[in-house]
Structure formats: C-alpha cells, structure tokens
Image (cartoon, rainbow, N blue to C red):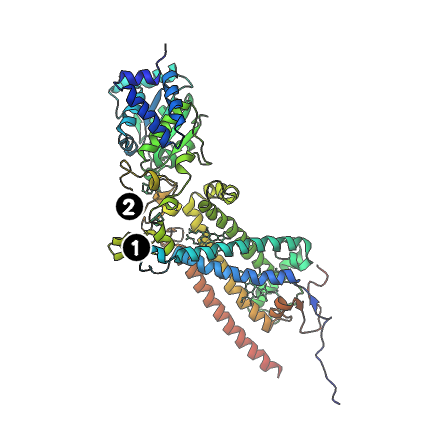
Amino acid sequence: MTETFYDVMRRQGITRRSFLKFCSLTAAAMGLSPAYAAKIADAMENKPRIPVLWLHGLECTCCSESFIRSAHPLAKDVILSMISLDYDDTIMAAAGEQAEAIVDEVIEKHKGNYILACEGNPGLDEGATGGMSCIIAGKPYTEQLRRAAKDAMAIISWGSCASWGCVQAAKPNPTGATPIHKVPDIGNAPIIKVPGCPPIAEVMTAVITYMLTFERLPSLDRQGRPKMFYSQRIHDKCYRRPHFDAGQFVEKWDDESARKGYCLYKMGCKGPTTYNACSTIRWNGGLSFPIQAGHPCIGCSEDGFWDKGSFYDRLTTIKQFGIEANADDIGIGAATVVGGAVAAHAAISALKRTQSKGDQE
Amino acid sequence: MATVTTKPHAEPAVYVYEAPVRIWHWVNALSITLLAVTGYFIGSPLPTMPGEASDHFVMGYIRFVHFAAGYVLAIGFAGRFYWALVGNSHAREIFFHNILRKSYWSGLWHEIKWYLFLEKEPKAYTGHNPLAIFFMHWMFVWAVTFMIFTGFALYGEGAGYDSWQYTLFSSWIIPLMGQSQDVHTWHHLVMWVIVVFVIIHVYVAVREDIMSRQSIISSMISGWRSFKDARPPEDKDVN
Ligand code: HEM
Ligand code: HEM
Ligand code: SF4
Ligand code: SF4
C-alpha cells in the first residue's frame, strides 16, 4: 500500500489534533472557506503522498531560509516532513552518491507524478562560464534540471531567481543565469512562479500544500503566479496609503515625516508597481514588513528589479543614453533643446521676413 | 466714391475642419495639458503636506484629474477616429494618407526646405501640408494611442484584476513591457515626446499663420480655410 500524507505525518510524530489544526490554518491562508479544512484533511488522509524534488541552482538559499521560518511551526514541520523525505540537498540527511541516487530513483519510480521545486536557476552554456558556473555531482546543473523537469508533474519556480533570473542574471549576466521557464528543452510540465527575494514563507507553504492536497495548480495569472497571493500590489494594501493619497511623503531619511511614518514614495518605494502579499501577510509571522520598518519596497518580486537603477529613486534610471538619467531628465533635456531651436528658428524667421518686406518696398 | 481694390485671391474660402474636428482639437489640447501637468506631479509629487492625513487629499485629487482627463482624451480620440471614417477628406489626413504618392514626398521635402530657409515661399494647402501630416501622424496619433494603452494598463492595476481595464489592457501590456515599473517609465517618456510635439506644433501654427499662404489658427476656430493669394493650393485635386 502506498503511503498517504497522513501516514507520513503520524510517523513523524505529529498528533491528529495538530494535523487538523494544520488543515484549517492552510485553508485560511489560501482564503478558502472553513469547509475546506475538512477537504484538505480528507485529501491528506486518503491520497498517496506526492514526492517532491527540491533542486538548487545558482541561488543564495534565501528561499529555503524563508521556508523553514514559516510562521506556524506546525505548517513547517508538516510540510518539511512531507518533502524532505525525497531530495533537498541543503536540508536532507543523505549526502554524496547516496543523495544523487535518490534523484534518479524518484524520477524513475514516480515518472510524471512528482513535483519539481526549483530554487535558483541554471547558468546556460551561452554564458561566459560556458554553463560551468554551477556543478552538481560533477555535471552542469542544467543537465540535472532538464532530466528532472522532463518527467515532473509540475514545476515550482521558487523565488525571483527561478522565476525571473534575479541578481545573478543582472547585466551583463556572466554566468548566463536563466529563469526556469526560459531554459531551452525544459519540457512541458506546467511552471508555477512564486517570486520574491525570498518569497513569503506562508505563501510558499500554502502553494505547496494546495498542490499536494488538490493535485492541481492554484489558479495562475498570465505570468504564471498564483492569483491568491500575487493579484494585488503592495501599494493597494499598504497601511501608509492614506499618507500617499494625502500627499504626505518622507523627503529624506530621518526627517520629521519619516518619524511620523509618512509614505515612502519619494524615497523610491516600488510598492505601486510590485505584486506581492507583504502588506497583507507580512513577514516573520505577521510581525512586520519592510515598509512598516521604514524602508521602501524594492520590488523584489518583480521581473528585472535588480537592473532598474537605485532602489531609492522613484523614476527608473535609463542607461541607454550614456549618462545616467531618468525620463524627466531626458524629457526636459529634449524639450530645452527643441525650445531653443524653436526660439532660434523664430528669430531667423522674423529677420528673413523683415528683409523680404524691405525687398518688396 | 473710391473704388476698393482687393488683392487678387483664390476661390472662396474652403470649409476644411468640420465642427467635430474643431471641438475635438480644443478639448484634446486641454486634456493633454492637464494630463502632462498632473502626470508630472504623479511622478515627482509636490512637497509634503503637514498635519493629519485625513485633512488632505492632494495626491488623490491630482490622480483624479489625471484619470478624468485620461478618459476625456481616450473617448475624444475614439470619436475623432470615428470622424476620420465618416467625416470629410481632411478629417482623414492625420490617420490615413497615401505614402506611396510622389507628391507627398516632394511636398514633404519642399516643406523641410522651407523650414530650413532654403525655399523662398511655402506651398499652399487646403488641408495639412505634408510635413504637418508626417508629424501629426507619427508624433501625435501614435504617441497618443500609446499613452491611452499604457495609461489604461496602469489604471487597470488600481482598478483590480477583475476590471475591464485590467482584462483589456494591463493583462497583456504589463508582461509585454516587462513589469509595471517599465510601463510607468515608457508612459512617462512618451509624455515628453508629446510635450516636444506641442512645443513645435504651437510654434509652427503661429509661424504659419503669419508666414504661410493660407489661414491657420482661425481655420481651427471657424473651420474655414482662406488663401492669401490667387494661386491654387497643391492639394486641390488630391483629396
Ligand atoms: C497624453 C496623455 C498622457 C500623459 C502625458 C500622461 C502622463 C503621465 C505621467 C508622466 C505619469 C507618471 C508616470 C510615472 O509614474 O513616472 C502618469 C501616470 C499615470 N497615468 Fe498617465 N498620461 C497620459 C494619459 C493617460 C491616460 C489616457 C490614462 C488612462 C486613464 C492614464 C493613466 C495613468 C495612470 C493610471 C498613471 C499611474 C498613476 C499612479 O501611479 O498613481 N494616463 N501619466
Ligand atoms: C495653444 C495651443 C494650440 C494651438 C494654437 C493649436 C493650433 C492648431 C491649428 C491652427 C491647427 C490646424 C493646422 C492647420 O490648419 O493645418 C491644429 C491642428 C492640430 N493640433 Fe493643435 N493647437 C494647439 C494645441 C494642440 C495640442 C496641445 C495638441 C495635442 C498634443 C494639438 C494637436 C493637434 C492636432 C493632432 C491637429 C490636427 C488636427 C486634425 O487634422 O484633426 N494641438 N492646431
Ligand atoms: S509606502 Fe510605498 S506602498 Fe506604501 S503607500 Fe507609499 S508608495 Fe505605496
Ligand atoms: S516589501 Fe517589496 S521588496 Fe520587500 S519583500 Fe515585499 S515585495 Fe520584496
């Protein structure tokens, strides 16, 4: 008989009471009605456990760090016990050959039935390092990734690295770091992006629980992000928003406005352009989030946030013009040049006109 | 009784700009002015307001004016496009013109030389001259279309996932440009394209009014084009 999630949890020493608590917490985190707690419990008791392979490419491990700090220790224990059983090279017990053998085993035994969770991304051959910047068990990571991706039921792109590329893909991207969905020959498994640097722990656990229990992807937006966590901007739910609407801004660090907790828009806050759940779920067990701590959002869950100039400028730096400038610098420059040309043209026109008038007389 | 001598003049004035075009022109000019000013202050807000947040709504009002003017611009532009289809031939010029016609390019070249002071005299036109058509098509029609599309894409973000603005605009424009911040940057940059157009446009309108061979500013008020000399305009038989 195949193991169910519930079997695994019980074996890990989790009581039935804790298990039911976990089910209701998860239903709440996903915004489902309380009735769903029973559904989740039912699924976990009866469905065979879905194996998870958690691969690491070029990354900083902040996703794992976030994940194991999930607000509710319960959720973390449960999920970790479910997935660490298979493969996650940073937190599993096995090492070396023994560990690598697990990857092959899972792929073979559960063809088309396991979830591939990717933390980080591969450096492709096209990069200056020729794909050699990330070697796992003596082979380029790209190979392991492609092999595991081919037979996966679904792929989760953890964090901004796997979703968008993140800092290792910053210009000029020497390692050819490439987000998972853009890796050639990655196969046809559906890819679900959970961006953020790192993503919020509760978001990660909820996404993975949803997939494990319902055996389908949560509904995604056009860019492949779960709608339940990425359909609103930080700005839409920011508690400083009334100060934004009132026109009350922090003008510089440590001014009176900063002490009063005004809006950080002028300090470069990217809340208005960033889709994430920080202003609702917050961090560290709902304790706080960057804006609450007085720092503008840097837009860490958005594509290309690392290549858009200073985190502390509201208007993006445009580098195509040689010198660093923003849209206003360029526009005012152009308007000044054109304005000057118009004035000169008007002067010459006037001169010509008086001349030709003189000719006629 | 003294006889009045009038200068030799062409056929009577021609009705060029129908009422919808004229009304649209001035509504459009006003809304673009409001959009540029409020847009600038959305990007670089005014100095901070003192006191309680509940006492003020400065950004709120600025954004409201921007969005209201945005709707006026967009609806006006859609109406203007409709008029290009049903109105007189001059209403079509800035949207559709035959770029394969040789006279368009020779006229354009002549007009450029006139602006470089290399031609003594401009040609007269009933409608727009080819250089005006060129700029109005490329720097105005396309820039405004771009602003409407990107503007509604940004608007859809605030209106939310299930809004029609989001479905029709944000859902594909934001990923196409990269992310929301890129849409802001492009929306902001193209504002300056339009500002540069307006600087040139207003200067040229005033200059042509004085120096060209036909009426200009009064034409956009009354709709009638009159000519200052007897020679026939270039586009007499073209339209
Ligand atoms: C010629 C027309 C327009 C001009 C010159 C203009 C200009 C601007 C500028 C400069 C910004 C600030 C961008 C930034 O964040 O750096 C802006 C923002 C915006 N514009 Fe426009 N705009 C125009 C048309 C429109 C239209 C038609 C709409 C649609 C209703 C629109 C909606 C918006 C929205 C929603 C924002 C973002 C506001 C925010 O972030 O709070 N704009 N516009
Ligand atoms: C004080 C400001 C303005 C003045 C005096 C002015 C004057 C004129 C005049 C005289 C014409 C007719 C040109 C001709 O007879 O061939 C015209 C056409 C036009 N103007 Fe303006 N204008 C002003 C502002 C603007 C602004 C702000 C815009 C938009 C950015 C604009 C866009 C246009 C367009 C698109 C046409 C072509 C009309 C058509 O064929 O439908 N104008 N303007
Ligand atoms: S602090 Fe940032 S997210 Fe919050 S209201 Fe201001 S701009 Fe928006
Ligand atoms: S507030 Fe912004 S920068 Fe900070 S974690 Fe959330 S999305 Fe990332």
With A17 as the anchor, is A340 left or right in this view? right
Q: Is residue B219 left or right of residue A94?
A: right
Seen from this angle, which residue lies furthest bottom?
A: B1
User: Is residue B166 visible to us here?
Assistant: yes
Same chain shared by disc 2 and disc 1: yes
Looking at this rendering, what residue extends furthest in the top direction?
A: A1
Q: CA distance from mark 2 to mark 1?
A: 13 Å
SS class, disc 2: helix
Quarter where residue B21 is shown: bottom right
**Residue at left offset 34%, top offset 14%:** A3
Provide the residue designation for mark 1. Answer: A250
Q: Which residue occupies 39% across, 43% down?
A: A233
Residue A77: x and y, percent?
27, 24
Locate residue B215 relative to residue A309 in the image: left or right: right
Quadrant location, the N terminus of chain B: bottom right
- Chain for numbered disc 1: A
Q: Residue tagged by mark 2?
A: A292
Measured as percent of width and height from the top left, residue B139 is found at 54, 56
Q: How far across and down, in percent of the image, does residue B105 sit?
A: 62, 58
Q: Hey, which quadrant is residue A307 in on the image?
A: top left
Is A109 drawn above or below residue B2 in the view shown? Answer: above
For mark 1, give the secondary structure. loop
Judge: label 2 CB < 8 Å from ligand 4: no
